[in-house]
Image (cartoon, rainbow, N blue to C red):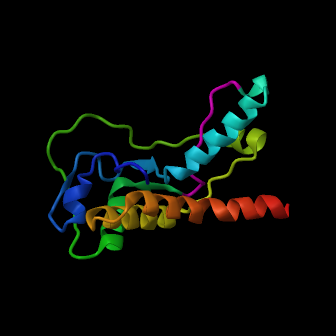
Amino acid sequence: MGRRPPGTRSHAVLHGRRSGSNSQSGAIRPWQHVLDPLIGYLMLAQRLAQGEREFADGWNFGPREGSEAPVSSLVQSLAGHWGAGARWEADKGDNPHEAAYLKLDCEKARTRLGWRPAIELERALQLCVQWYRAFYDGSDMRSVTLQQINAVVAPLIGAQRNS
């Protein structure tokens, strides 16, 4: 969850203040940690750098099946992971129309590149909360970020070596 969930005011939520969501709280979105598509784009860049022109095409790198969830569920889960009184409420005011359901078709990335999302939704939320907690605590964010990257990528490299 390298980005703030659309329609939420995460700073207020994570600091125990009530916040609204501009999104339809029941709208279903595909959620993923920023490292998942980044890994896919790096795999694609490697193929292109090797001169494999057939890979010069449009690609989707989305979350695994089942990572689609209503905005309300995601924000509630984030608040639960944060603890310390974090809470939210749906914004009942007039908001722009949004699609009720979004989903990405990533079959091409799976079949042609062998790419698979590496991070389950709950793990993505945990990583996001850990990162923001470290940020607000004044931690060395380069170190925190590199630790998270290593935690995600190391098992993938080990799996590649063993196959």
Q: Is residue 141 left or right of residue 50?
A: left
Residue 126 coordinates in the image, percent (x, y): 43, 68
User: For residue 47, what is the image quadrant?
Assistant: top right
- Say if the magenta span includes residue 63: yes
Residue 56 coordinates in the image, percent (x, y): 69, 24
- The residue under the point 30% across, 68% down is 79
Q: Is residue 86 left or right of residue 140?
A: left
User: For residue 42, what is the image quadrant?
Assistant: top right
Q: Quadrant of the C terminus?
A: bottom right
What span is colored magenta in the figure? 56-66
Viewer-proximal residue among 124 and 87: 124
Q: Residue lying farthest right? A: 163
User: For residue 130, what is the image quadrant?
Assistant: bottom left
Secondary structure character of the magenta stretch overall: loop
- The residue under the point 38% across, 38% down is 99
Residue 97 coordinates in the image, percent (x, y): 29, 34
Q: Is residue 46 above or below residue 110?
A: above
Residue 131 coordinates in the image, percent (x, y): 39, 62
Q: Quadrant of the N terminus?
A: bottom left
- Say if the magenta span includes residue 88: no
Q: Is residue 80 left or right of residue 50?
A: left
Viewer-proximal residue among 51 and 62: 51
Number of numbered discs visible in the structure rendering: 0
Would you say residue 89 is visible in this rendering?
no
Q: Is residue 88 above or below residue 43?
A: below
Viewer-proximal residue among 151 and 120: 151
